[in-house]
Image: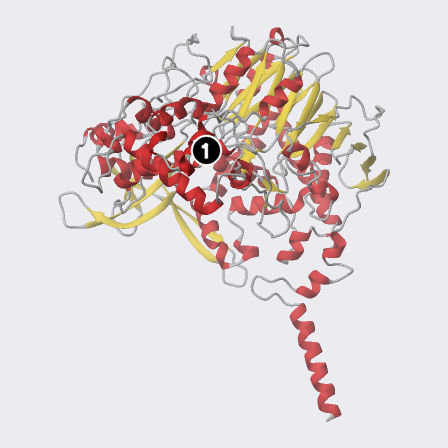
Amino acid sequence: MKKLKALLAISITVTLILLLQTRIGEVPPLGKFLNPVSGFWHNAESKTQPAGENLKLPGLLGKVTIRYDENRIPHIFAENDHDLYYGQGYVTARDRLWQMDIQTRSASGRLAEIIGPKALGNDQYQRRIGMVYGAENTLRGMMKEPVIRTMLEAYTQGVNSYVHQLSPKNYPIEFKLMDYAPEDWKPINCAFLLKLMSETLAGGSSQFAMTNTLKHFGAMATNDLFPAEQFHDDPIIPAGTQWNFRPVEIPKPSPSFIAQMTATLKTIQKQEGIGSNNWAIRGSKTSSGYPILANDPHLNLTLPAIWYQVQLAAPGVNVAGVSIPGAPCIIVGYNQQISWGVTNVDADVLDWYQIKFKDVSRNEYWYNNQWNKVTRRIEVIKVRGGSPVNDTVIYTHHGPVVYETTAQKAKGTHNNVPVGNALRWIAHDESDDLLTFYRLNRGKNYEDYREALSHYTAPAQNFVFASNDNDIAITANGKFPVKFKDQGKYILDGSDPANDWHGWIPAEQNPTVKNPERGFVSSANQTATDKTYPYYLNWDFGNYDRGKRINMLLSQIKQASVDNIRVMQSDNYSTRAEDVLPAMLKYLDPSRMDDLQKSAYELLKNWDKRFDVNAMGATIFSNWWDKFYQLTWNDEYQDSKTLLKYPSFDRTEKLLLKEPNSHWFDNTLTPGKENCEDILRRSFNLTVAKLNSKLGRPGKNWEWGMVKITHIDHLASLTGFGTGNFSIGGTNDVINALKNGSGPSWRMVVQMGPRVKGYGVFPGGESGNPGSFYYDDMFKTWRDGKLNELLFLQSPTENSARIKSTLTLSAK
């Protein structure tokens, strides 16, 4: 019996050891993860860092001095460009290696290698839309430019110097949780990150939904619901700006497009975004007499933070701001002479084409009245715990065929022919976007700014600019195809050459303005220009609300200071509520209300139209508008079996203010005929009843910060590694456009002058390690609407009480 017990104990022990060292499904080997020597315990970091550290690394040409301030932000000083970007790669990897790895895996369709079959769909989609193909083309373009080649190779060397130092016990905690090892960095990974930004900011499309909408409602109704011009408009380039150039020839609409738009027979969706803000004010409107520039790009917020703050200094360059973890240079920032920032243009640089194949072999497709050969690219997707999946992607001259449909009836016959949807996307083209940032980092004046922008392709950005020469400017910049009006609003006939892109708008003819009379420039993702601009950029821009509010505040400012601008970046006043709420309230009759409805009515009537954290009026208005929108449109849309495009806020607002008896207000599911008043009253009553049922009587629970639950998740949605829920003001149509986990990913204000001063913060910290004090040490500052004064050292030996440690790198 004793022997049996002993054998049983040994057996259980061996089994436990094996289980602890074995991955079970998505669960990592717990023995490795819990190991007190090499497991997650090893990832805890002390807030106090060594005062000095010296490392000898292979590949350096000289000495690199990296001085860390109180927020653990590195200030890198090198003796040459190679060592500067080597140092940037090294310190970025030291802080953000897992983030760099997972984002490039996501962009390149390689998540299934570490996650398993459940990530296969993501990987196939990324391969099929041509992310790898586009990154290869971009890398080829970057490697043609000697300074960019040097920069990429040095950055890669720096990353790999850190990777090669690591042993399993030093791996970032996410590698341990997911049970995989970091791999060598490659220059193409930097290109993948650029493609990821293009996908995030210029990878959405409403063409499928718009095509379905056209078939469902017909051309007349679709044109009514989705007009080319917005009801409200306040363009980025001030209306009336003169275009002092002769435009290239504008193409005529194709016959197939005209046929599509004159038809009367009825027959991954782009969302209304919350965008970004930037502006610059001339010295004549500031207290210092020098320009002030502000920028807060809005993105999906994550931990680790989207941006990595850094200063880069070497002969010919001294620049500070934020970079993308995994790519060299400063993307948004300033130097001693200039500053710049970005917002998304939302230009139409992604089009879908319907392709008709000759037969089921799909070896040829019909284009320009003849059969043309396709090419094929085999994408091999490795799958953890399974066999590799080979996905063959067909390429036409338009680009990859992302979706293949079994068949459609050939015209005039009973035969079926295979069809597909090919993607023409600017992100597929050869480009050298990093050269723009390399030049901006070293820019000295307006001429340098304009030259730098001439190298930029995608994603198209509104580049705002300010200089110590008292110049300000803004340019809607990117590589824009020459298109006929509304080309790409719907899926295009891929057989018709007239639907192809027709060359490019010359870079010098991109919309721009310098030193306008009003004394400021700004953008908030709204329409780029007025109707006089000769080229078509898009029909579907962001709403004008934030832009109008920014321009109104800047028009009133006479002696702007950094603090004025800081407060302005957190402004919660709703232009949208200002425009529509009075009209909504006039349709309500308080004498017909019960006590609860009267209470809600009075809260709305007395509300200051600010989406502040304690505002109950904001909660009622937001929910009322959403219900009003649903009751206006759902009856027309709910019987469709296909994805349709819903009308914009702007179009709905025009119905409310100008067309109260429009047939669109009539509920087709009821025998009566409703108008705007009927829909508003019903939606108000339903809103109040729902809030009462969910939150109780008006009080603390009705405050906007309580209702609008906000949180910042870990990049891999790992529980406990995010912020958890917190209360904060803001919403999508105010300057402080913070809602649903998206918002200002970096707030920056730069005061130009003899000694340039920068202020900024992002919601997180420099470290990507959840076990570090510096993982989220700047979150509270960001949440409270404050900014850190940014340390901008002029030499590696400059004295500053804010410097807490120094890392010296030298050649091995």
Is 228 rendered above or below residue 209? above
Could you say which is closer to the camera, residue 417 or residue 321?
321
Residue 491 picture quarter:
top left
Mark yes or no: residue 127 visible. no
Residue 189 picture quarter:
top right
Could you say which is closer to the camera, residue 233 or residue 488?
233
The residue under label 1 is 273
Left-right relation of 717 to 320? left
How would you rate the neighbour count of disc 1 (Cα within 10 Å): few for under 14, some for 14-19, many for 20 or more?
some
Could you say which is closer to the camera, residue 258 or residue 636?
636
The quadrant of the image that shows the C terminus is top right
State the image coordinates of residue 686 (x, y, percent, origin top left).
36, 41
Could you say which is closer to the camera, residue 396 or residue 687?
687
State the image coordinates of residue 230 (x, y, percent, origin top left).
36, 22
State the image coordinates of residue 365 (x, y, percent, origin top left).
29, 42
Tally the marks.
1
State the image coordinates of residue 292 (x, y, percent, origin top left).
63, 15
- Residue type pointed to by label 1: Gly
Which residue occupies 66% across, 7% down?
289
Left-right relation of 614 to 771? left
Residue 463 picture quarter:
top right
- Where disc 1 sits, the SS reads loop
Left-right relation of 618 to 310? left
The quadrant of the image that shows the N terminus is bottom right
Which residue occupies 72% across, 26% down?
790
Is 360 rendered above or below residue 583? below
